[in-house]
Image (cartoon, grey):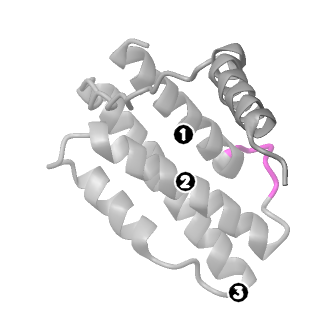
Amino acid sequence: MESADVQRDQTVAAAEIVALVLGEDSPLPESASDVEELALLLRGHISQLGIVAPPEASALRGAQQLASACVPDGYMPSRVYLVKLAEATQALIAVVQAHGADPAKPTRRRRWWKPRINVLRGPLFDVAFACWILAASAPRA
């Protein structure tokens, strides 16, 4: 994929989660686990967008500071934290889109050759056949 496509995909995915939290039609999360899950997703997007955002951006520093904090206990404090985290992510998305930086190229993992099963059957058959011949030629007591 092109680096611009990867950046666009990251910003689109982050914007979708932000819309889940900040959208007018979106209800508040019902349980504490829902809040934790949304906060985890937003933190992940902040870390991914932090790679492509300019390091001197104040939106990046603010989002990272907010993401490093724990979700507060209580119904209202946790929802307020979630909204603030979504707003910080939204500001970071705007910075990344305005900056237009190419994201760091992901390192390619070395792919090892995976042999087909038939390639392994030949040598295995040879070893089994050799063992059978040795067993058949051994003197019987």
Give the mark, 3 or 2, whose residue is nearer the N terminus: 2
Which residue is disc 1 drawn over? 14
Q: In which quarter of the image is residue 98?
A: top left
Q: Is the residue marked by circle 3 packed among few (<14), some (14-19), or many (20+) residues within 10 Å?
A: few
**Residue shown at the point (60%, 64%) measured from the top left:** 82
Q: Is residue 100 left or right of residue 139?
A: left
Amino acid type at image mark 3? Gly
Q: Residue furthest bottom?
A: 73
Please rate how many residues cluster around mark 1, counting C-alpha atoms within 10 Å: few if below 14, some from 14 to 19, many from 20: many
Please, what secondary structure does the residue beneath circle 1 have?
helix
Q: Mark 1 belongs to which amino acid? A: Ala
N-terminal-most mark, 1 or 2: 1
Residue 45 in the image: state x and y as whole percent: 48, 47
For the record, the magenta segment spans: 23-27
The disc placed on residue 74 is: 3
* Residue type at numbered disc 2: Leu
> Is 46 one of the magenta-colored residues?
no
| Residue 105 position (above or below residue 138) | above
Frontmost residue, 50 versus 86? 50
Badge 1 vs badge 2, beta-carbon distance below 8 Å: yes
- Which residue is depicted at the point 74% across and 29% down? 133
Residue linked to disc 2: 42
Q: Which of marks 3 and 1 is in front?
A: 1
